[in-house]
Amino acid sequence: MRDEYDFTEGTRGKFRRPEAVLTPPLHLDPAVLAFLTARAQAYGITLSELVNALLKKEIELIEATE
């Protein structure tokens, strides 16, 4: 790396997208991933669809008990 960089011609916020929605990576235990992958294939849906459906049900249960 250089000791100094010249940013006099730089544009602040040139690549900023305030409407952008970032999706964080999700890391599952290998056993959980294998189980859910098999279940998703058995139901004929994607892994993402299955995980989202399970999490939505869990949210409903949490909200029902509050």
Image (cartoon, helix red, strand yellow):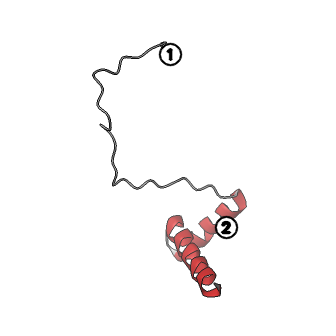
Which residue: 33% across, 47% down? Answer: 17
* Residue 47 in the image, given as x and y percentages of width and height: 54, 65
Which residue: 70% across, 58% down? Answer: 29
| Quadrant where the image shows the C terminus | bottom right
Q: Which of disc 1 and disc 2 is earlier in sequence?
A: 1
Furthest residue toward bottom: 64
- Compared with 42, 2 (above or below) is above
- Compared with 21, 41 (above or below) is below
Camera-nearest residue between 40 and 6:
6
Q: How many marks?
A: 2
Q: Name the amino acid type tagged 1.
A: Met
Q: What residue is disc 2 on?
A: 35
Left or right placement of residue 26 versus residue 8 in this view: right
**Whole-Å distance between the Cαs marked 2 and 1?**
46 Å
Which residue: 29% across, 31% down? Answer: 11
**Foreground label between 2 and 1:** 1
* Residue 42 in the image, given as x and y percentages of width and height: 57, 74
Q: What residue is disc 1 on?
A: 1
**Which type of secondary structure does the marked residue at label 1 adopt?**
loop
- Compared with 44, 61 (above or below) is below
* Residue 44 in the image, given as x and y percentages of width and height: 50, 73
Quadrant assignment, res 63: bottom right
**How packed is label 2: few (under 14 Cα within 10 Å), some, or many (20 or more)?**
few
**How packed is label 1: few (under 14 Cα within 10 Å), some, or many (20 or more)?**
few
Q: Name the amino acid type tagged 2.
A: Phe
Camera-nearest residue between 59 and 34:
59
